[in-house]
């Protein structure tokens, strides 16, 4: 049944169940749980909805759906939704009653939608309309099967609070980036590390103030009203005085302080501290010193440096403001943006626009969307916690007293966990984790609060005492000074927002300022630092991290040393992120810690798998879940796109295990598997090492010719035509040429092929001689120790390839798009010379073609080949030579040959389509006969292996790893 059909059937069953029912006090809970879960398909309904939430206006909101920014006012069946009822000594309609509740909520929690319902009729009020009371959508219960789509906003991310926060955060980030660039120009030495540090801290402080004034911590528009009293030339001094006040306890302030400053509260937390004096830490920003690099003292002790303060006795500098900058800050950044709606998780993305893109690349920093963060934290711990809470809330077999005891025990468990992010950047992972854990705790608090009376609240104690999850459970290590300041501030904002939700649930104030909690974010090089100094391993619950995305060939000298210290010689081919895996394994050994890291996908491909994963597996590490390669995007300007994997691991071999595939952007599939190996496949722990000869009895595969010619021996189609126009006799010495990409795309390319040319023949083609001399001149200019220079005495030849012989061969491109199910290969019989990005197998056998173009061989390639970004990078030593071929019967071999011939025949039938067009997955519908021919070939090859997997690639890959293991075990 289709999704639409199944929803309609669910709605019909819902209508049958609830027709004639509807008692507000006794059935609201089950009515809405069933509607949201069974009809609309909302997951984790018990943890996403709150019932009977007390309000400051008196009374209770029947249903709160925070993620959809919606509240529900539920009435009993038969109640007239237009008739007023006496509530708090006023006659109000159900909508007016709900609107009063909505207006009493803190600004950030106010809904966009109100649903009024009496079990027989639904009314949907959009509060963003001019007349939400009168301009509403209405439908009856019996119309639900046809009208259920009208409730899609309850589950559609486009209408969610998260989406609204995302939009506000991106807009805010653009504005802060604009302000940052303008202020940087006002510094006397804008390129110095000290000036950039001061500006970064200034921006962080301003953002906190902007949030605080919109969230009600400072009073509405407090910063705006304060700064409007000053001219541009006075703004610098005004901010200096304000920051000093914010860092001064009330009892220590000047009793004669101006009224406009006295209204600001004491913030605490070190955010507004002028210098590092008295903090016990030292920070240096000498010109020429890398102020952003973490350091280790000579005796091995890590130096933790303050990121919110300056050097001892040196106040942070604030530049002069211009009229334009004042206008930007006051009218666009402050008045034009609701900073209470900012997402602290997107806080790093907000500030990425203030960082130079070159700095971001060299530091490997990439800021992250909440959706991608959840790919890490959900399978690591959040799914389990949500399911546990869901089970407590929905268990019909326990008493209310027992349920409350379980809820309190669950809350205590939440407060017992600790999280360490050893490359925390601007705190995205820690912040999103904190938000999610506090949401779970708030759900517990809401359930415990339901039905209690005011005197019971007093017995429970202050609202603040009922909050047990705190920032002290969150630890981070970060090498970038600015990012540390952002991370600390983002966590503070997340705490303040969560406190607001708790206050709304309990209808009592939560003390926000001065800041009491502080996360444990330190400035250091995580690879050189002993993590035990920050958080002893026996006290750590989870490791989460998004380490720098720096390939093994792009390391700085310091990063190379970091890698060498951990891995020795075997680390030479490893990406920098591998250091975090080794550090984590050392830290986790002997504990129950569970970890999940985002990583460059190359650590699970090609030559990096063995040196990284073999020692880890031998030490006892096990992979418990993994996301295979996908594009890692973010929310910021100039965002960096990289191809990554996510790996969840520990010293516990947990079950069930899950593999996540991402066949296209926005699409994700989860598979339950028994085991996950270092290639992130559901197969045994086999390590594929380079083989110089094929393990099976098949022809060799070799790489083609590397030109090394300075573009003098290679010719485009136009250059060939121009040469022949001048010198028709040159045609004898021109051959087709391909680097692989041209073969796939059908692009004509040529080369001068001169191994057999004699001196007499060369005299007849002077234009060809010019190309040769140009090649000689280019090679003579190259590094004397390099191959190009050594070939200067043979300027008419491409770099030699001793295995090539004229004749038919199978051409195999080195690089091919990951989107293709089959790497396009084919026979070459027109004398084309293969380049060094084009492998060749000297055979005209259709059997060899059939096996190599089958799903079996392509599945092996996908498992063990390296990648160029996300594209497959084929190698003969690691893919072709290690592939175990089938041992077919004569009949099975004939079936493969016949199916291979059919593939070739169907390719020709679709001429002049290129291989790129034929094998573009978006064009499958255009070439159905070719698709059917490949399916027949896949079945024939599968039969030759003696298995019946029906094309299940997970099973195919596991089988091939088993065959490889058997073929390489003595």
Image (cartoon, rainbow, N blue to C red):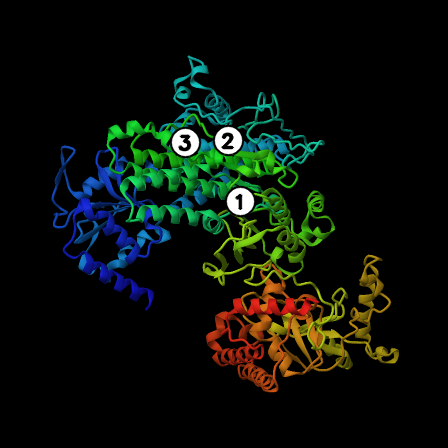
Q: Which numbered disc, 1 or 2, marks the residue that appears first in the sequence?
A: 2
Left or right of 64 in this view: 330: right
The residue tagged 2 is: 322
Secondary-structure class at tag 1: loop
Q: Compute the Cα span from label 1 to label 3.
A: 39 Å
Query: Residue lying furthest top in this view?
Result: 255
The N terminus lies in quadrant: bottom left
In the picture, measured across the screen, residue 624 lies left or right of residue 131, that is right
Q: Is residue 716 visible?
A: yes
Residue under label 3, please give it: 212
In which quadrant is the C terminus drawn? bottom right
Query: If you read the primary sequence from the N terminus, does the residue marked by circle 2 or circle 3 appear first?
Result: 3
Relative to the observer, which residue lies in front, 805 or 610?
A: 610
- Report the Cα–Cα distance between label 2 and label 3: 24 Å
Tell me which label, 1 or 3, sits earlier in the chain. Answer: 3
Q: Do callouts 2 and 3 mark residues in contact (Cβ within 8 Å)? A: no
- Label 1 or label 3, whichever lies nearer to me, is 1
Q: In this view of the protein, which residue sits in the foreground, 683 or 276?
A: 683
Q: Residues within 10 Å of mark 3 (few under 14, many from 20)?
A: many
Q: Is residue 737 visible?
A: no
């Amino acid at each position: 049944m289709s999704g639409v059909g199944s929803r309609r059937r669910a709605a019909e069953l819902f209508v049958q169940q609830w027709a004639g029912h509807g008692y507000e006090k006794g059935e609201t809970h089950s009515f809405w749980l069933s509607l949201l879960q069974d009809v609309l398909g909302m997951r984790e309904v018990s943890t996403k909805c709150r019932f009977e939430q007390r309000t400051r206006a008196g009374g209770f909101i029947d249903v709160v759906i925070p993620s959809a920014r919606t509240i529900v006012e539920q009435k009993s069946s038969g109640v007239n939704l237009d008739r007023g009822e006496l509530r708090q000594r006023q006659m109000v309609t159900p909508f007016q009653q709900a609107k009063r509740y909505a207006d009493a909520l803190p600004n950030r929690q106010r809904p966009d939608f109100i649903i009024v319902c009496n079990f027989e009729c639904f009314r949907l009020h959009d509060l963003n309309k001019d007349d939400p009371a009168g301009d509403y959508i209405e439908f009856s219960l019996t119309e639900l099967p046809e009208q259920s789509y009208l409730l899609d906003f309850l589950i559609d991310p486009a209408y969610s609070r998260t989406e609204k926060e995302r939009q506000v955060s991106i807009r805010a980030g653009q504005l802060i980036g604009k302000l940052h660039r303008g202020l940087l120009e006002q510094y006397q030495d804008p390129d110095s590390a000290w000036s950039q540090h001061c500006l970064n801290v200034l921006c962080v402080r301003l953002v906190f103030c902007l949030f605080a004034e919109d969230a009600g911590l400072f009073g509405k528009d407090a910063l705006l009203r304060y700064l409007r009293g000053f001219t541009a030339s006075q703004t610098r001094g005004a901010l200096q005085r304000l920051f000093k006040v914010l860092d001064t306890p009330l009892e220590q302030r000047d009793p004669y302080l101006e009224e406009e400053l006295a209204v600001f509260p004491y913030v605490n937390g070190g955010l507004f501290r002028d210098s590092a004096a008295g903090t016990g830490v030292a920070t240096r920003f000498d010109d020429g010193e890398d102020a952003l690099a973490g350091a280790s003292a000579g005796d091995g002790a890590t130096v933790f440096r303050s990121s919110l303060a300056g050097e001892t006795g040196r106040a942070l500098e604030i530049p002069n403001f211009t009229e334009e900058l004042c206008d930007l800050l006051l009218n666009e950044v402050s008045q034009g943006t609701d900073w209470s709606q900012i997402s602290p998780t997107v806080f790093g993305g907000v500030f990425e626009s203030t960082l130079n893109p070159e700095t971001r690349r060299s530091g490997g920093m990439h800021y992250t969307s909440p959706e991608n963060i959840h790919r890490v934290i959900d399978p690591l711990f959040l799914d389990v916690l949500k399911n546990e809470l869901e089970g407590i809330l929905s268990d019909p077999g326990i008493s209310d007293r027992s349920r409350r005891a379980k809820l309190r025990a669950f809350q205590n468990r939440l407060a017992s966990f600790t999280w360490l992010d050893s490359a925390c950047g601007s705190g995205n992972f820690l912040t999103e984790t904190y938000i999610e854990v506090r949401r779970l705790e708030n759900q517990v608090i809401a359930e415990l609060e339901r039905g209690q009376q005011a005197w019971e609240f007093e017995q429970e104690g202050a609202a603040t005492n009922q909050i047990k999850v705190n920032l002290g459970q969150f630890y981070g290590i970060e090498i970038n000074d600015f990012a540390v300041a952002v991370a600390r501030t983002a966590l503070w904002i997340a705490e303040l927002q969560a406190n607001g939700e708790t206050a709304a649930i309990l209808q009592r104030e939560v003390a926000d300022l001065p800041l009491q909690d502080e996360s444990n974010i330190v400035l250091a090089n995580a690879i050189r630092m002993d993590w035990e100094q920050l958080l002893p391993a026996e006290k750590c619950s989870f490791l989460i991290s998004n380490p720098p995305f720096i390939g093994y060939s792009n390391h700085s000298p310091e990063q190379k040393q970091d890698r060498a210290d951990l891995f020795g010689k075997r680390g030479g081919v490893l990406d920098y992120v591998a250091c975090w895996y080794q550090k984590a394994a050392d830290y986790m050994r002997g504990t129950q810690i569970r970890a999940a890291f985002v990583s460059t996908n190359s650590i699970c491909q090609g030559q990096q798998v063995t040196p990284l994963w073999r020692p880890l597996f031998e030490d006892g590490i096990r992979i418990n879940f993994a996301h295979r390669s996908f594009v890692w995007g973010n929310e910021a300007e100039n965002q960096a796109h990289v191809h990554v994997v996510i790996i969840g691991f520990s010293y516990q071999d947990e079950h069930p295990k899950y593999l996540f595939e991402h066949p296209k952007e926005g699409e994700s599939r989860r598979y339950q598997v028994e085991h996950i190996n270092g290639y992130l496949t559901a197969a045994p722990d086999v390590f594929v090492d380079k083989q110089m000869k094929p393990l099976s009895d098949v022809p060799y595969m070799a790489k083609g010719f590397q030109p090394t010619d300075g573009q003098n021996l290679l010719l485009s189609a136009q250059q060939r035509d121009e040469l022949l126009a001048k010198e028709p006799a040159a045609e004898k010495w021109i051959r087709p040429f391909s680097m692989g990409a041209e073969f796939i795309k059908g692009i004509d390319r040529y080369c001068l092929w001169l191994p057999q040319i004699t001196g007499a023949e060369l005299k007849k083609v002077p234009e060809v001689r010019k190309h040769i001399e140009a090649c000689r001149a280019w090679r003579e200019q190259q590094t004397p120790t390099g191959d190009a220079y050594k070939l200067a005495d043979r300027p008419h030849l491409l770099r030699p390839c001793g295995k090539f012989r004229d004749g038919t061969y199978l051409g195999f491109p080195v690089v091919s798009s990951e989107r293709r199910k089959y790497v396009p290969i084919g026979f070459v019989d027109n004398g084309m010379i293969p380049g060094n990005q084009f492998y060749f197998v000297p055979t005209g056998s259709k059997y060899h073609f059939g096996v190599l173009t089958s799903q079996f061989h392509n599945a092996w390639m996908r498992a063990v080949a390296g990648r160029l970004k996300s594209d497959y990078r084929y190698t003969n030593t690691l893919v072709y030579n290690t592939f175990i071929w089938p041992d077919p019967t004569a009949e099975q071999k004939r079936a493969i040959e016949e199916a291979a011939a059919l593939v070739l025949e169907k390719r020709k039938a679709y001429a002049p389509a290129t291989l790129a067009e034929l094998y573009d997955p978006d064009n499958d519908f255009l070439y159905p006969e070719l698709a059917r021919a490949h399916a027949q070939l896949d079945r024939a090859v599968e039969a030759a292996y003696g298995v019946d997997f029906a094309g299940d690639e997970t099973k195919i890959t596991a089988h091939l790893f088993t065959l490889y293991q058997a073929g390489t075990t003595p």
